[in-house]
Image (cartoon, rainbow, N blue to C red):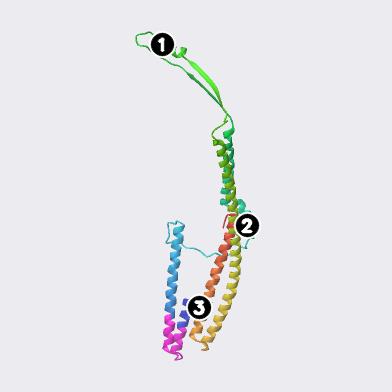
């Protein structure tokens, strides 16, 4: 039963008591004021929920924002996966680590490319050609004849031995090796950050699970206390202030239990994402 329903019930009860002459009119006015405040709070909460849905729809870049809504998560809670197992699986599927391993492989190839500067280069070149000319006032062979007589071919080889290149090749190799070491260090750093993130996610999930259990116990106790207080209040053995305190505590523990439940779902799914790459 939500707060508005409880306040409505209390207002009906107070009106009946007033008609029976058992309470002053001020008690009825207080009940009406409390119901109005609860309705205002419910309206504010509904507006906040709608705005949150709009923000979520915009983040998802949805075209139809007005008809966007969410559904509750049903089903059993997922188990909390061991941190070490999640980490070992994440090493093979984590995209950050895959990219870092690619950087290491590229750096290794760059070393080989730089070292190729030490290798002598043998080049081969060849060509064919011909020519045609005319001189004014003089006879000359025909175009086809000249193209045939002046036809020539050539080919050659050249060998380049890198004896001294101003240390350019050596410096290139050193830079490539430095980049290779840097890539390995970046990969190790990415591994450490992933391990830390998974450990944090694991302990957050364990904490959320314990909090969820505690909230269930607290909610049950608060609801029983509220039912007992309502009976006392109905019998005139408790004040309105005591009744409101018990009611607010019951509603607060229910809200905390719901929040803890969804936090546990979030934390376990984060672990599952690192473990499988899917939520």
Disc 3 secondary structure class: helix
Q: Where is residue 138 in the image (x, y as percent from the top left)?
A: 36, 8
How far apart, in angstroms, are the residues tagged by discs 1 and 2? 86 Å
Disc 1 secondary structure class: loop
> Is 23 part of what is drawn in magenta?
yes
Question: Which of the pair 2/148 is nearer the observer?
Answer: 148
Tell me the tag on residue 86: 2
Q: Name the residue under label 1.
A: 142
Neighbours of disc 1 within 10 Å: few (<14), some (14-19), many (20+): few
Q: Where is residue 27 in the image (x, y as percent from the top left)?
A: 44, 86
Give the image quarter of residue 76: bottom right
**Measuring 59% from the left and 46% from the top, which residue is drawn there?**
181
How far apart, in angstroms, are the residues tagged by discs 3 and 2? 41 Å
| Contact (Cβ within 8 Å) of mark 1 with mark 2 | no
Give the image quarter of residue 52: bottom left
Disc 2 secondary structure class: helix
**Measuring 46% from the left and 61% from the top, which residue is drawn there?**
56
Q: Position of residue 134 (x, y in %)?
A: 38, 13
Q: Please indicate, yes or no, whether residue 274 appears anywhere in the rendered image.
A: yes
Which callout, 3 or 2, points at the residue further toward the start of the chain?
2
Dominant secondary-structure state across the stretch colored magenta: helix
Neighbours of disc 3 within 10 Å: few (<14), some (14-19), many (20+): some
**Measuring 43% from the left and 12% from the top, which residue is drawn there?**
146
**For residue 5, above or below residue 156:** below
Q: Please provide the residue range marked out in magenta.
A: 12-33
Left or right, 115 with respect to 139, comes to right
How far apart, in angstroms, are the residues tagged by discs 3 and 1? 114 Å
Which callout, 1 or 2, points at the residue further toward the start of the chain?
2
Tell me the tag on residue 248: 3
Question: Which of the pair 107/55 is nearer the observer?
Answer: 107
Foreground disc of the pair 3, 2: 2
């Amino acid at each position: 039963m939500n707060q508005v329903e409880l306040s409505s019930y209390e207002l009906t009860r107070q009106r009946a008591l007033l008609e029976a002459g058992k309470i002053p009119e001020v008690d009825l006015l207080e009940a009406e004021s409390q119901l109005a405040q609860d309705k205002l709070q419910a309206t504010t909460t509904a507006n906040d929920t709608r705005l949150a849905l709009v923000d979520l729809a915009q983040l998802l870049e949805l075209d139809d924002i007005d008809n966007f809504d969410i559904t509750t998560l049903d089903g059993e809670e997922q188990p909390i996966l061991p941190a070490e197992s999640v980490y070992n699986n994440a090493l093979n599927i984590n995209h950050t680590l895959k990219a870092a391993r690619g950087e290491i492989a590229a750096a290794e190839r760059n070393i080989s490319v730089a070292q190729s500067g030490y290798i002598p280069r043998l080049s081969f070149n060849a060509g064919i050609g011909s020519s045609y000319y005319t001189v004014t006032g003089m006879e000359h062979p025909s175009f086809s004849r000249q193209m045939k007589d002046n036809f020539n071919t050539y080919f050659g080889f050249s060998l380049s031995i890198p004896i001294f290149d101003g240390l350019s090749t050596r410096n290139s190799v050193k830079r490539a090796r430095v980049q290779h070491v840097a890539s390995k260090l970046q990969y190790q750093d990415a591994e450490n950050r992933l391990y830390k993130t998974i450990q944090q996610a694991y302990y957050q999930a364990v904490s959320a699970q314990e909090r969820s259990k505690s909230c269930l116990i607290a909610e049950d106790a608060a609801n029983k206390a509220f039912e007992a207080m309502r009976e006392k209040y109905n019998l005139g053995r408790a004040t309105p202030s005591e009744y409101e305190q018990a009611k607010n505590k019951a509603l607060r523990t229910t809200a905390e239990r719901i929040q803890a439940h969804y936090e546990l779902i979030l934390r376990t799914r984060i672990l599952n994402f690192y473990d499988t790459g899917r939520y």
